[in-house]
Amino acid sequence: MSAPAEDERYRWQVLGVVMLGTVMSALDSSIVNVSLPSMMASFGASVDDIEWVVTGYMLGFSTFMPLTAWLRDRLGHRRLYMISLAIFVVGSLLCGLAWNLPVLIAARVIQAFGGGAITPTGMAMIAEVFPPKERGRALGIWGVGVIVGPALGPTLGGYLTQTLGWRSIFDINLPIGVVGLLAASRLLRPDRPAASEHRPFDWPGFVTLTTFLVALLYGLSKGNHEGWTSPLIVGCGLVAAFSLVAFLVVESVTTHRILDLGLLRHGQFSVALAVVAVRSTALFGGVFLLPLFMQSHMGLSEVRTGALLLPGALVIGALMPVSGRLADRFGPRIPTVVGLALTALFMFMYRRLDPDTSLWGVLAPTLIRGVGLGLLVTPVTTAALNAVPTSRAGMASSLMNLVQQVSGSIGIAALASVLGRRTVFHQSVVGESLLAGSSVWTSRAAEIAHHLRDAGMSPRDAALAAGSILARHAGATASVAAFDDAFLVGSGVVLVGIVPAMFLATSRKASAPKDTDALRALAD
């Protein structure tokens, strides 16, 4: 990026264009969740199947993201950013036209190929036009743009799904994408590809990394259905393990790496990646579970579900610029640790969620989540980018976003697995209680039969209907208990993130690049 340091106007133009593109891709990360039950009904899909509408997007996001550094060297930031936006728009169009679930998942992967380059390319442009002392502020403001999508996503998605059908949630990307392309073409300065534009592509690294991601995520998503000891799942595990080892070996001997793992030698960058991984594992899974529970067990519509999720997302957007300034002034450790603790509390409060929970009981934890994420996201991102030389910010942002997306995919698959296994466990417990003639279930059956007789049913029909109603209620009780267990597991995972967070810097100066290459890059 050739913009001079004193060109304040251009810096903010870059920030505005990047925010517009990331709002579009971020919108799609949340707008889908509220519409999943409608997609399940439309295609007759199970939870395990519909999970791939989200996981497939994350997988495409993750596999394409490592390519951005190589493509940036070939194309330059401006061209890569615009091509990514165009691919995302085409993928959105195909999603809206999908006639079955496999086609929808394939279109989501195409959509993700564009989205996978938008975020790291945008972050790299911000890192290059803003000096380190201003990055926290810039990333905080950019973060507000990132949060606008997820904030509006559930509400907008619920309204569109309820009024126009789930396909409209993808069509909404088309006008935003066109505006983003026009803004990028008019405002972004053409930049030259890097001097290494003709460096060879790391095909062995790309193939081994992609194989690892596909095998890992496919195995996790099918574990409940196939059985964790089935040949398919064991085979996926072996392929994933072999591919990961092969990838690490290849990257250790290859000159032109698809991912520069040497960035992990920067201590603050490695610590920030660990925090991002733990945070994403639990949070993506939690956001996947909550709309399903609210609609399937609480009977809320898509619009009401989205409305309940909106205030917490707005809190995130309001606090991100504040936390960026705090990170610039005091360092990232304190806001990150506090943010993780509050985020863990959010999931812990859902350990007793049930269909009779009040709307405030659902809303209050999301507000706490909003405060936690508002304090957490910007300091960790700033710490990661400030820990590496400016010239390597593009690779660093690609690696960080890759970790976030892969961890999020693992989180969805893992918590969906917890949900499935605990559902089976609680069904067994409830079933044994029913067969044993527990006084609780017996009295409840008698109460239901009494009401049915009062409504005019014969004693025999009332008894049969009461047994059927009780069986459905027992199944719902087991499912609710399984959701509660999954939220509790997610809370524990977030708490683990406090351990690496304690190693983050306590001052901005401590988190800045200190190696010779970094200082030379900043001086240039």
Image: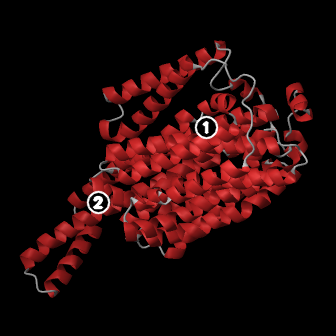
What residue appears at the point 43 percent right and 27 percent down from the top-left corner?
Answer: 237
- Identified by mark 1, the residue type is Val
Residue 250 position, x and y percent, is 59, 15
Give the left or right position of residue 269, taking residue 178 as reference: right
In which quadrant of the rendered view does residue 226 lie? top left
Query: Mark 1 touching mark 2, by CB under 8 A?
Result: no
Amino acid type at circle 2 is Gly
Residue 401 pos. (x, y %)? 63, 40
- Residue occupying the far front of the picture: 186
Q: Which structural element holds mark 1?
A: helix
Question: Mark 2 highlights which residue?
Answer: 475
Name which residue lies at 64% across and 56% down.
20
In the image, residue 376 above or below residue 390? below
Q: Residue at x 63, y 53 (%)?
A: 182
Q: Residue at x 64, y 45 (%)?
A: 119
Q: Is residue 230 left or right of residue 317?
A: left
Q: Residues within 10 Å of mark 2 (few under 14, many from 20)?
A: some
Observer able to see residue 298: no
- Which colour scheme appears in the figure? secondary structure
264 vs 27: above or below:
above
Label 2 residue SS: helix
Q: Foreground residue, 159 or 246?
A: 159
Q: Pick the quarter of the image with the N terminus.
A: top right
Could you say which quadrant of the image residue 394 lies in? Answer: top right
For label 1, count other residues whose C-alpha is less than 10 Å away and answer few (under 14), some (14-19) or many (20+): many
Front-lying residue, 197 or 241: 197
Q: Position of residue 448 (x, y in %)?
A: 22, 77
Q: Which mark is residue 403?
A: 1
Return the residue nearer the eye: 436 or 146.
146
User: Can residue 35 be seen?
Assistant: yes
Vertical order, 230 against 439 (above or below): above
